[in-house]
Amino acid sequence: MGGSVLSIKDLHVEIEGKEILKGVNLEIKGGEIHAIMGPNGTGKSTLSSAIMGHPKYEVTSGSITLDGENVLEMEVDERARAGLFLAMQYPSEISGVTNADFLRSAINSRREEGQEISLMKFIRQMDSKMEFLEMDPNMAQRYLNEGFSGGEKKRNEILQLMMLEPKIAILDEIDSGLDIDALKVVSNGINEMRGSDFGCLIITHYQRLLNYITPDHVHVMMQGKVVKSGGPELAQRLEAEGYDWIKQELGIEDETVGQEA
Amino acid sequence: MTTETKLPFDQEYITSFSKDMNEPDWLTELRVQALEKADALPMPRPDKTKIDKWNFTQFANLLVKSEAFASLDELPEDVKALVNLEAKDSSLYIQRNNKPAYISVSKELREKGVVFTDIFTAAREHGELLKKYFMTAVKSDEHRLTALHAAFMNGGAFLYVPKNVEITQPVQAIFVHDNAEANVFNHVLVVAEDNSSVVYVENYISTVPQADSQFNIVTEAVAGNNARIQYGAVDTLAKGVTTYVNRRGIAARDARIEWALGMMNDGNTVSENVTNLVGDGSYGDAKTVVVGRGEQVQNFTTNIVHFGKRSEGYILKHGVVKDSATSIFNGIGKIEHGASKSNAEQESRVLMLSEKARGDANPILLIDEDDVTAGHAASVGRVDPLQLYYLMSRGISQAEAERLVIHGFLAPVVNELPIEGVKKQLVEVIERKVK
Ligand SMILES: Nc1ncnc2c1ncn2[C@@H]1O[C@H](COP(=O)(O)OP(=O)(O)OP(=O)(O)O)[C@@H](O)[C@H]1O
Ligand SMILES: [Mg+2]
């Protein structure tokens, strides 16, 4: 088993002086699929941004390690090269840089100078993954995310995932804005990655994505913490009943991060 | 008020220089008259840049001794890189400081009656033709620098394309600056007669790392009815070279003039690029990319003036500024009364890469006619940290991420350059400059 372990312990995160995450504990191993659900504004994207090293988020205490290495001491690019990947809720648009050039740079960043991927091999790989994701071949030569529709952006995030083959991926609302067919295609992409070397954290609001990708663990976030964890049946119950029963169970009035339990 | 500055070379010197070059009398006369006027004329006033402390008038040498290049093998490596050495039958003029140093004129050009030569030979052998156009688009009495240009002209090229002649191969001129003492007053005249077309590309390149000297450059591009001139330039003059460069075009009926300018000097630079759309249905397109670095101050004014009906003018400028450099972008679309159904569009964007960098984009539309369309877009900003974060989150280093964003920013202009070789060269220069 060559799987990696991403370990998050008692993580506290602030943004512009405001504490958003208030002690998150989570461990994701190669071979596992975790899902995080939770109402709007409860800190899900904050968690993913803190893991990846978004410049605006400040970790005030706690730890994040990947296979024992301190992630918090790494620059953003080092985290990526160490094996982390974040499919962002709102990917950036970068004018003048083609999708293909960007991806080739990203692949080559993982290789030594002089060992760059050959153009032919790169094109073959990119073509085949794009075909798998039913993407228009022209998207390779378009500027990165510029003018992409919401669904096209999400597909493009999964294309990057498949090309870069990270050890641990975090997918932040990869299903939002996808039509039924696109949802299937994107799910196929993620399932294609499944294996003992690949761990994944899926942030979603909807059970329907989890119908295609059965998670091993489901977590619920409220008030900047993981307040409940369970198996796939937890997601189904949330889909059917909403969050009120959890709030009642835990005595939470307002689930957003400004509030204390 | 004009400040009294004693010019370094007098009438006697100019007259004897002109005679030594065997110039026709009209040119000697034009030089002498320009010199007489120079002192009284004001300096140009580029909007938003003060140039009164810049030295445009004081210098020790008007001529330096330079050897010709017996063959292309003798070229310095940097210059060789600009030349397509494989091309057997190309049209190429190389000037070394103020010395015509190499010329080849293709069979195609010779057979079609095209004139392509250095400006001195043009004055001697095609005097009447030169006289018809020389300093007509840019007048010697516009301001002190045009007057000094006319008086001190000590280099340049002449390209004349007769009626109905379409040249397929680009015509190239390289102005090499390899002597730090050299001051160059370069005049390029491109004439495309009715229904002709030509692609002309020039490089100004310093091979000295630094100098304390002046370049005073005037280009006149004259396109006859239904003619087309594609004019590409990449300027890479060294730090310490103060440059005044004025590239101006006149487009007759249905003529097209397309500029693609890579302004990559390392010294202080004032650039004017003006296209006068005189004829009905004429078309002007002015694309500029700029990189400013170090302490340099640069001012780029692009101006398209519509006189003809249904004339179209497009200005597109993208620049990056780093270190403590300053770059001012002035874009002027002017539609004169009577130029109905014309369209003036412009876009200027400046990306600042450091705290101390200064950039400014000033779009101006001056419209004296009702029945027209016009538009402008301008922006000055910094590299978006979220873009860098996104790229870095895929493993790309910060330096590489910045490089990608900068190239991406300049790409819309660079990609439009008409000549593949120049495009490639420009990309390399940008790479060097933004490092
Ligand atoms: N710059 C900021 N300043 C102050 N508060 C912020 C800032 N950015 C985010 N927040 C707050 O942090 C909280 C958590 O936001 P986050 O994006 O992590 O929520 P989320 O769980 O991903 O929500 P959603 O399901 O809507 O995507 C929100 O209340 C949000 O308003
Ligand atoms: Mg979110």
Image (spheres, coloured by chain):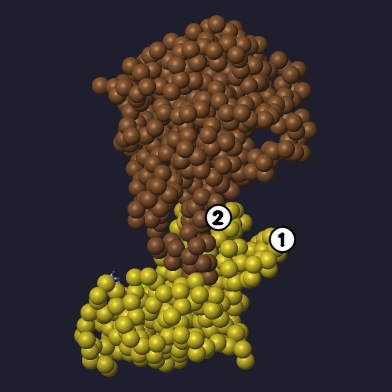
Colour displayed for chain A in the image of the structure: yellow
Q: Residue at x 68, y 18 (%)?
A: B114
Mark 2 Cα shell of 10 Å, populated few (<14), some (14-19), many (≥20): many
Classify the position of the N terminus of chain A by image quarter: bottom right
Q: Residue at x 39, y 37 (%)?
A: B299
Q: Which residue is mark 1?
A: A120
* Disc assigned to residue B98: none
Q: Which residue is mark 2?
A: A98
User: Which chain letter matches label 1?
Assistant: A
Classify the position of the C terminus of chain A by image quarter: bottom left
Q: Nearer the viewer, residue B184 or B403?
A: B184
Mark 1 Cα shell of 10 Å, populated few (<14), some (14-19), many (≥20): few
Quarter-wise, where is residue B336 in the image?
A: top left
Q: Residue at x 44, y 66 (%)?
A: B389
Report the chain shown in brown: B
Residue B269 locus on image (x, y percent): 43, 36
Instruction: Residue A218: tell me if it is visible.
Output: no
Q: Nearer the viewer, residue A20 or B212?
A: B212
Residue B58, placed above or below residue B429: above
**Disc 2 residue type (three-letter):** Thr
Q: SS for tag 2?
A: loop
